[in-house]
Amino acid sequence: MKTIHARRIIIGGVIVAALVILTLLIFLALLFPAGRAEAAYRFGRFRARPPVHIYRAAAATPRGITPAEIKSAYRLPTTGGRGTIAIIDAYDAPSIEKDLAVFDAAYRLPACTIKNGCLEKHRMASLISTNSGWALEMSLDVEWAHAIAPGAKILLVEAKTPSGQNLLDAIDYARKRKDVIAISMSWGGAEFSDEADYDGHFAASAGKVAFFASSGDGGTGVSWPASSPYVIGVGGTSLRFSPSGVVANETAWAGSGGGVSAYEKQPAYQAAYRIARAAGMRAVPDVAYNADPASGFGVYMTSGTKRPKGAWYVVGGTSAGAPQWAAIQALGRAVSLPALYADKASSAADSYFRDITSGANGGCGYYCSARRRYDYVTGLGAPQTVRF
């Protein structure tokens, strides 16, 4: 009997100890969320990824959503644009001017060439290698920024590599130019512990330049630089048209990145809007745009093989939204973070945004679900004007 009693005491002690350890683990998990643990590195290790996805095989003719369709869906003007849209990407796209010419001809857009001053390419190093994934990203960015704001100038700034420092150098070059009014950064990477130390690269030009960054394509989760309180984070939607060509519905795209930053404090414009469950931290994204590859954009790109051959691709991802929101800034010259939140809070909110109220980017409940006003998948919603 004594032996049995002793065993019971030992088993009871083991159970109590296990419960104590489990309680401690739960407390630590709440104190240090998974996103923060995964991002426990510093700026020196940051490398960006372009959130771009090809839908179906390459083709000889354009497919996918057209400039006319997206402009109708988002109530954008058919012409216009002024100032310079800076596109920040990594590596070199040697055929970008020729590819843009094919794109413009297919959609009957005004020619945008280096000779006529519409297109400029600035390389941040004399020798830059090529990369097929980034080349596709550059084709998407340049072609669709021009499609949305054909009257604006396009400045493609090529960083030597997608390292954090090389990309910041490219951003600094663009933001210091007097003609640049919008900067598109259609890339991102995991947050890092000292990211707030680099906000000055965006804050220094706030008011003069509007910065736009993709929120990511891995579903729920926050990426930098979209997490910066001086950058407009662009999430993703799925846009569907009726047979007559009007918008049937727009829902949250499953791949759209979003959530609560682990390191950036909540900016004043979000605090004034009273975003739920942000706990005093930066909420991402701010706005949304079509990103679903199934409703993707037609892009022309020449491959980087020894015998280069051009082809049309249908491309999606939140990387499509950053350059097109930058083009919206070139059309209206009115986009800023305070203005976006003030417009959404106004009685005329529907004239500024399509509120995305259905769809999700994961199984985490509140933070993964679209809803009225603001949500962590599509932000304030998709554009319905250029006059914010």
Image (tube, rainbow, N blue to C red):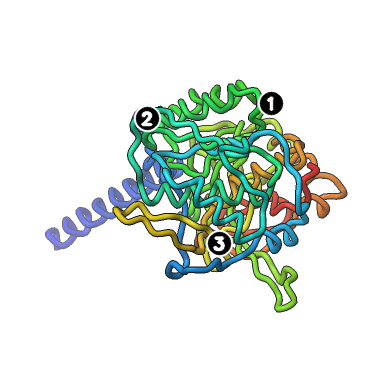
Q: CA distance from mark 3 to mark 2?
A: 37 Å
Q: Image quadrant for the C terminus?
A: top right
Between 342 and 278, the one lying in front of the other is 342
> Position of 197 compared to 337: left or right?
left
Q: CA distance from mark 1 to mark 2?
A: 29 Å
Q: Nearer the viewer, mark 3 or mark 2?
A: 3
Q: Image quadrant for the N terminus?
A: bottom left
Q: Is residue 304 above or below residue 294?
A: above
Looking at the image, the residue that sits furthest to the bottom is 243
Between 369 and 352, the one lying in front of the other is 352
* Residue 279 in view: no
Q: Nearer the viewer, mark 1 or mark 3?
A: 3
Between 346 and 301, the one lying in front of the other is 301
Residue named by callout 3: 298
Residue named by callout 2: 42
Residue 162: quarter of image: top left
Residue named by callout 1: 208
Residue 127: quarter of image: top left
Q: Is residue 92 above or below residue 217?
A: above
Label 2 environment density (alpha carbons within 10 Å; few <14, some 14–19, many ≥20): few
Q: Residue at x 35, y 35 (%)?
A: 128
